[in-house]
Every structure is written in structure tokens, then in C-alpha cells.
Image (cartoon, rainbow, N blue to C red):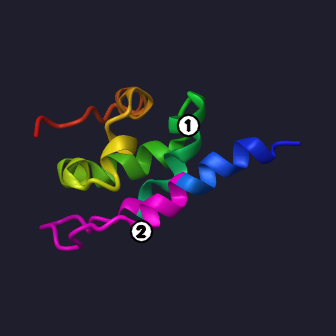
């Protein structure tokens, strides 16, 4: 049964949903929930899916904003999140 695995994924999604993000960026709509396809890769160290990589690249201009958000910082700045971003070819910007 994969219940223990589902709980952390749900927790990340809830945190992303509750995260406060400024939704007004120039060409990108910043929405941390858009990164939910990456939750499995970040939590479990599994390779990111193509959907995860696409969303990570689309949300890359927002990453500095997410890093400043105390609700999102610990997830966005985790070693696995950095690894996922690098694997997707969307390394974190210098903030």
C-alpha cells in the first residue's frame, strides 16, 4: 500500500496551494501550484517527468519570488528541487 508515499505528496501540493505568490509577472503568470507535477520528483528523488520539466521551465522566472516566500522556500530550495531543475535544463537563477 502506498499511503505513506501519498501523504508527503499531498502535503507539498497543499503547501503550494496555500503559498502566497504575486500573480503579476511580465510574461509569466506565477503560480506555484503549476509546479505540482514536480512534487513526486522532489520528494522521492525520482526523475522528473516531461510535464514537470515543462512547468519548471515556464515558472523559472518566478523561482526567485518563490524562494522569498517562507511557505515555499523549504521546498523550492531543497537539494532534490535543485537536482530536478538541473535535470530539466532549467537551473535556478541567481537571485
Q: Residue at x 71, y 49 (%)?
A: 6
Residue corresponding to mark 1: 43
Q: Residue at x 30, y 36 (%)?
A: 90
Q: Residue at x 72, y 42 (%)?
A: 5
Dividing the picture into quadrants, the one containing residue 92 is: top left
Question: Quick one: 25 or 75, which is closer to the camera?
Answer: 75
When the figure is inspected, residue 81 is found, relative to residue 31, above or below; the finding is above
When the figure is inspected, residue 29 is found, relative to residue 36, above or below; the finding is below
When the figure is inspected, residue 80 is found, relative to residue 21, above or below; the finding is above
Residue 28 included in the magenta stretch of the image: yes
Residue 31 x, y percent position in the rendering: 34, 65
Residues under labels 2 and 1: Cα distance? 18 Å
Q: Residue at x 57, y 55 (%)?
A: 11
Task: Tell me the tag on residue 18.
Answer: 2
Question: Quick one: 58 or 6, which is closer to the camera?
Answer: 6
Residue 62 x, y percent position in the rendering: 22, 55
Question: Quick one: 8 or 60, which is closer to the camera?
Answer: 8
Q: The magenta stretch spans which residues?
A: 12-32
Question: Quick one: 79 or 53, which is closer to the camera?
Answer: 79
Marks 2 and 1, the one that precedes in the sequence: 2
Q: Quadrant of the N terminus?
A: top right
Q: Quadrant of the C terminus?
A: top left
Mark 2: give few (<14), some (14-19) or many (20+) Cα within 10 Å: few
Residue 23 x, y percent position in the rendering: 23, 73
Residue 15 x, y percent position in the rendering: 46, 59
Mark 1: give few (<14), some (14-19) or many (20+) Cα within 10 Å: some
Q: Residue furthest bottom?
A: 24
Amino acid at each position: 500500500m502506498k499511503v505513506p508515499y501519498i501523504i508527503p505528496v499531498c502535503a507539498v501540493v497543499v503547501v503550494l496551494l496555500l503559498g502566497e505568490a504575486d500573480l503579476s509577472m511580465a510574461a509569466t503568470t506565477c503560480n506555484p501550484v503549476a509546479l505540482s507535477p514536480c512534487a513526486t520528483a522532489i520528494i522521492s528523488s525520482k526523475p522528473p517527468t516531461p510535464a514537470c520539466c515543462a512547468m519548471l521551465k515556464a515558472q523559472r522566472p518566478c523561482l526567485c519570488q518563490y524562494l522569498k516566500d517562507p511557505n515555499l522556500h523549504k521546498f523550492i530550495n531543497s537539494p532534490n528541487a535543485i537536482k530536478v531543475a538541473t535535470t530539466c535544463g532549467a537551473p535556478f537563477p541567481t537571485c
